[in-house]
Image (spheres, rainbow, N blue to C red):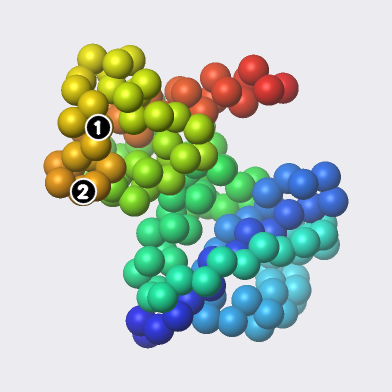
Amino acid sequence: MSGPTQLYRAYDHAGTLLYVGISLNTLNRMAQHNTGAAPWFPSLARVEVQEFASRKEAETAERSAILVERPKHNICHNYNQPLIGSRDLSEKMTASEFRAALAALHLRQSWLAERLCVSTTTVNRWATGAAPVAPYVPFVLELLRERRDGIRE
């Protein structure tokens, strides 16, 4: 199916992101999670829903959200261990995932370009999809995310 699809984020009372998923109907999907298959469901306090025009767009956003936001109970795309040495290098970061990571980390393209010793044009090409994201970039973004999380704690 390629029609409108919803991306949902499930949070507990403390605001911890428990799970990210996609569905044609989030309400029905929550009922399925409530059957006991989802260990996080008893902790559920609120759900945020985002609409996407197609399943493909929702899948891309889901993968990005899981990669960047690291929900507690997702398995697929959730690299709970540091990405260095554990990320499949054949799994390329898309332009959409790259943009989502920059936004989630509040990074400017020019700042990242300077730190990576590449041109701002190169980073812009990664963000627009005009050039593939360099294979090392997900690792760098993961390290920046871990550093940010460590600073906030």
Task: Tell me if label 2 and label 1 are in contact, CB under 8 Å.
Answer: no
Query: Image quadrant for the N terminus?
Result: bottom left
Front-most of residues 118 and 150 = 118
Residue drawn at x 61%, y 26% is 149
Please provide percent x and percent y for residue 148: 57, 23
> Would residue 139 be visible to someone looking at this image?
no
Determine whether the residue tagged by mark 2 lies in a helix, strand or loop. Answer: loop
Lower position in the chain sequence, tag 2 or tag 1:
1
Please provide percent x and percent y for residue 137: 30, 30
Residue drawn at x 48%, y 76% is 5
Residue 129, disc: 2
Residue drawn at x 66%, y 83% is 28
Q: Is residue 39 above or below residue 31?
A: above
Q: In which quarter of the image is residue 109?
A: top left
Q: Is residue 58 above or below residue 17?
A: below
Q: Which amino acid does label 2 sit on?
A: Gly
Front-most of residues 8 and 44 = 8
Q: Quadrant of residue 42?
A: bottom right
Please provide percent x and percent y for residue 105: 50, 33
Q: Mark 1 sits on what residue?
A: 123
Query: How crowded is the residue under tag 2: few (<14 C-alpha within 10 Å), some, or many (20+)?
Result: some
Please provide percent x and percent y for residue 150: 63, 20
Front-most of residues 14 and 36 = 14
In-image side of 68 versus 125 (left or right): right
Front-most of residues 152 and 33 = 152
Query: Image quadrant for the C terminus?
Result: top right
In-image side of 151 versus 13 (left or right): left
> Would residue 48 be visible to someone looking at this image?
yes
Q: What residue type is labelled 1?
A: Val
Residue drawn at x 37%, y 44% is 99
Determine whether the residue tagged by mark 1 lies in a helix, strand or loop. Answer: helix
